[in-house]
Image (cartoon, coloured by chain):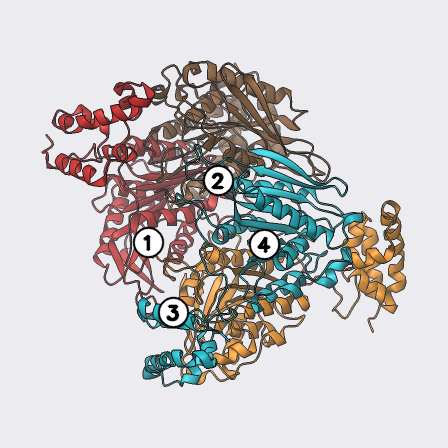
Chain colours: A red, B brown, C cyan, D orange
Amino acid sequence: MLIEKVILSEERNVTLTAYIQEVGGEFTYIDKRPAILVLPGGGYQMCSDREADPVALAYAKAGFQTFVLRYSVGANAAWPQPLEDYEQAMKLIRDNSEKWFLDPNRVAVIGFSAGGHLAGCAATMAKNKPNAAILGYAVVYGEDARKCNPTVPDVIAAVDRNTAPSFIFASRRDNVVPIRNTTLYTNACAMNDVAFESHIYAYGPHGFSTAEPSVQDPATDMCPRIGDWVEDSIAWLKENLGEFSTDGLRGPVYRFHMTDDGENFYSADCSLLYLLNQEQTKEIVSPVLNMIGQAFAAGAGVSVEDISAALGNLTLRDMLGQMHIPTSQIEEMDEKLKDLKKI
Amino acid sequence: MLIEKVILSEERNVTLTAYIQEVGGEFTYIDKRPAILVLPGGGYQMCSDREADPVALAYAKAGFQTFVLRYSVGANAAWPQPLEDYEQAMKLIRDNSEKWFLDPNRVAVIGFSAGGHLAGCAATMAKNKPNAAILGYAVVYGEDARKCNPTVPDVIAAVDRNTAPSFIFASRRDNVVPIRNTTLYTNACAMNDVAFESHIYAYGPHGFSTAEPSVQDPATDMCPRIGDWVEDSIAWLKENLGEFSTDGLRGPVYRFHMTDDGENFYSADCSLLYLLNQEQTKEIVSPVLNMIGQAFAAGAGVSVEDISAALGNLTLRDMLGQMHIPTSQIEEMDEKLKDLKKI
Amino acid sequence: MLIEKVILSEERNVTLTAYIQEVGGEFTYIDKRPAILVLPGGGYQMCSDREADPVALAYAKAGFQTFVLRYSVGANAAWPQPLEDYEQAMKLIRDNSEKWFLDPNRVAVIGFSAGGHLAGCAATMAKNKPNAAILGYAVVYGEDARKCNPTVPDVIAAVDRNTAPSFIFASRRDNVVPIRNTTLYTNACAMNDVAFESHIYAYGPHGFSTAEPSVQDPATDMCPRIGDWVEDSIAWLKENLGEFSTDGLRGPVYRFHMTDDGENFYSADCSLLYLLNQEQTKEIVSPVLNMIGQAFAAGAGVSVEDISAALGNLTLRDMLGQMHIPTSQIEEMDEKLKDLKKI
Amino acid sequence: MLIEKVILSEERNVTLTAYIQEVGGEFTYIDKRPAILVLPGGGYQMCSDREADPVALAYAKAGFQTFVLRYSVGANAAWPQPLEDYEQAMKLIRDNSEKWFLDPNRVAVIGFSAGGHLAGCAATMAKNKPNAAILGYAVVYGEDARKCNPTVPDVIAAVDRNTAPSFIFASRRDNVVPIRNTTLYTNACAMNDVAFESHIYAYGPHGFSTAEPSVQDPATDMCPRIGDWVEDSIAWLKENLGEFSTDGLRGPVYRFHMTDDGENFYSADCSLLYLLNQEQTKEIVSPVLNMIGQAFAAGAGVSVEDISAALGNLTLRDMLGQMHIPTSQIEEMDEKLKDLKKI
């Protein structure tokens, strides 16, 4: 491993520290690695060492190229400077993907507390969005965030369908950043069909970092699960960004959006109810309704309305799959739908 | 272990099955056990076997007395019948605590899907509230819940400060019960100062139960963490209901409410900002403000307003603790506050 | 689940308790289950309740049909009575495989302490051998075992190539059954090419059972890993006996013997060195030596003797695989070897 | 973190790479760290990168100062050169404990395969013994070790009471280093009263390192538990070397020797049977025999001989503790024993 420190602004004391691991050689099947950019917390007054190296080491151990950004704080923290530091760092990482043996399309960001606010901004409003975002006890609700930095934007309101897939964790008994920051963010993800995973632990302090005894006093009153986010987030990152394999980085392993309802095209991955309600697609999909009606009503005596109400969340593909319709037939319908020009 | 089946209503086919373990003998330090009542799902049309025994066995293994309620479904599911079945079962369990070697004040409930709706009602609106509630991919949002049973109430709206401590989990890609059910519930807990823990896993189907291969086909497309809720919920239950020890069941290990702001008395566990804003308590607490002002402003030059804004979530006790004020002094202030009659 | 108690001998107070779970119905892909027979410990003076139900529940939770045998102890413990109780129980279980929904070829045994001695006898010298054996802090070394029951045989000496695959665990600081019992058993497995897994934890008492707080006082001085054997043994059992799947119980997933050297036939799974040393097989295998010689010596300058010394543990199949020889060619050689009559 | 590379021998290409983490600052309660020296494997022909950085990172993440030694291999591997490289490295580490912020009495060693042989030599025969040793699929049995380096000593035969506490792991289906290497080592530890923990996993290849997908192809046929040794060894190291705490590094948490029988003094931590058999101690201990006799025989009718046979492994302290003799009385007896001059 090599450690390289890049000065982004001497004046504002902004630095990017890179922890770069080899590829090739005995690592026969690895020619590039996923990467992660760490944004420590500190109330936009400092960048905490407790959320820098210990976090970088966790992802380095898992095989990631890892970067720590010490962004503008204190007198330099006025918005949008911290976000611009992020943009500069992310651009540098992606531009140097060959030199640093990483895949520019597999770069995540992780931020804690105020750094979590910055990571949330990266996930929602940056020009250089990360491919995945991890938010640790992040202060993303405007009202709360502005208590430590009055110039910053609300992240919650910025969540939309294009927000980066997010992994969010916190302690419910955090007495510095209220837990509503985390629940509002997950709720916004749910409402906007953003891929996410979230873990809220019953109790523990703010700022627990990795909760390793070398970072957080093990005598702290905190629930034993509170450090689980480290391994869980690594597994989640690999599901989102790709896992190492002899065929290169492989993934993602699941679809980020629940449905294609929000896209500018139609497909078999739109929800059935949605397709039934569009003038353009009604006709193509109506035979399905008959199939369902026959399949279900035969044994159950429920009306088609009941069914569409109860199962309206299912995509056309899932619904047909459940009825054991051959894949070829589903693909055919998918093509027909995609051929339509969505108005 | 003994298995006992109690018929609660022959007509509606309502039964309570009890899995009762010994106490005493070689279990020298156990004279009673915590208990849990399992409410299987099934859209209020059935009670699924996949969420009955396999779930009961998980908690039985952890030492709990375990009960499965098969409540009124189908033609008998009109509200409030299912909730009345729950009430009857919970009363029976607590009334028979001696016979069944359990502590009537340590009885949890767990429900899945529609059973999670019922568990949510138990946690919020039952006469016989459980001491803790676990909601698995529960359909607690009224609009969604009424798709499977048009007569049921909204759980989200019923969450208040007196809701039972809750453990909530689901798959974000649940395509039957939308994930908003879970995020809205956790958000309601956050807003009402209800103790909770929550785990939302990135992907997996509805109805995964314990996700053991003996319950859910291991070839299912689901994230490997999805079964973690079982062990996590057991640990959480023990933190809430009490862990076995030579001194009897010991716990809970953390305070359920963040602050006493919502109580009908004042205490050192009210938030500092709240106490500063009450006519009755302002005077008692104002010296603290000076102490803080001195402590912080000395080195930092920030105003008292800044501090109270930034740290307004801290309780008086936590704030004084952070400034290393002796416990005796904190207790003294706590008593003074409690002596006041809250208007 | 049903609990059924079968009396095997009223006089000697020998009973078999069965915990039977359903198949079919909602458990669509399950028509039979693996099974396990639990042999509690107690120095052949008693059968401990702490190693009965809590253990049965752990495997029941994982989907196993589970049985607890209370065998002959105290005045009735003279050998071979306990082993005969085991034989009777195992025969009953396999004979009733249809009634009890289990696969008679997937029945394991688990024993603790003196029950571990009995399980060790089952694995090595029984007529009705189990398909896998789990030994918990077992007293399997004759000299030690005879301290609690002077009539019992030495298990270590009985380990041979036909011993059942074994999972062995203990606490190294066990001050009742010396840890040599466990190391001698694993060593005997190693020397006799018996499949095994073993976990020896740094510290903890004798008789910790599942180490759940409901079984072992959580204040006990024992290492936190000591209960890991429960989940690890379940995973191991499924690797050995078969995991649930939509195609029925699937497994085992690995070969039990390292090589076929001890079999009464030749194959590509014999070690290369062994085949080179047999008159009958020398000729068939000698071309391989040339291939290896060419492949390695080319770059390395080492002699064929060096290679065969260093890599003598590799089977012919593994060696050819490493040199990327096509599978068809390996199969051909395998057939040729199997066609020989081993003298 | 800083990375520093020290050249120990330019000629033989021997280097020590140090990964050094900060102390103090925000890490308020840390003024020094435990350390570990990594010895990669490679058959004494090379030092594998797969067992260098990935291993160092695992312990660095846990808060250790970490060192990788690339020792003499190939033409320079003749014994005792590799051991002398180790001695030089370990001396350097301990001599620089202030500079590198580590506790010289809390330095472990970990070695893999041939590096595990070297670690085993360090644990048994070095001048600068480590405070704990981790052996990964180590080739410690002379006959096997000499296949890759004909000059090396047998480690098994060198195990004695003064061997460093050892953590040993391997795959049972290792087809390069036979599993007997591991079982013989654990057996030697058992027979010589050496503290150890061991994990042998059912199947997997030689050389799996941390088994992370970034090190070992995840498609490898290996049991899912095979990487558990990483976290388990970290926990074990902290039990042996000390865990971080606000009172400094705290530990070890258990006694390394089972009894003091092998020491050059007597104490209450000698086994009861041993003390009963020594002329010098017989008299002091004989009253205990009466106490036991009374306590047990009262209810049980067993002879004192039976008891001493059955419980001969218990120390005097443990035996008295079990009979609820006051600690003060045990301490008194302990002192009396220690006052004797052992002949």
The tag on residue C335 is: 3
* Residue A252 point in image, percent of width and height: 29, 48
Query: Mark number for residue A243?
Result: 1
Q: Nearer the viewer, mark 3 or mark 4?
A: 3
Amino acid type of the residue that numbered disc 4 sits on in the rendered structure:
Ala
Q: Is residue C179 visible?
A: yes
Q: Nearer the viewer, mark 2 or mark 4?
A: 4
Q: Amino acid type of disc 2?
A: Pro
Give the alpha-carbon distance from disc 4 to disc 1, as whole Å. Answer: 36 Å
SS class, disc 3: helix
Residue B172 is situated, as x and y percent measured from the top left of the image, at 35, 36
Looking at the picture, tell me which residue is in the foreground, D96 or D159.
Answer: D159
Q: CA distance from mark 3 to mark 2?
A: 66 Å
User: Mark 2 = which residue?
Assistant: A205
> In which quadrant will I find the N terminus of chain A?
bottom left
* Amino acid beneath label 1: Glu
**Callout 3 touching callout 4 (CB < 8 Å):** no
Label 2–label 1 contact, CB within 8 A: no
Q: Tag 4, which chain?
A: C
Q: Residues within 10 Å of mark 4 (few under 14, many from 20)?
A: many
Measuring 30% from the left and 45% from the top, which residue is drawn there?
A132
Residue type, numbered disc 3: Glu
Subunit of mark 1?
Answer: A
B222 vs D115, nearest the viewer: B222
SS class, disc 1: loop
Distance between the Cα atoms at labels 3 and 4?
Answer: 33 Å
Residue C133 numbered mark, or none: 4
Q: Are marks 3 and 2 in contact (CB under 8 Å)?
A: no
On the picture, is D26 further left or further right than C81? left
**Quadrant of the rendering where the C terminus of chain A is positioned:** top left
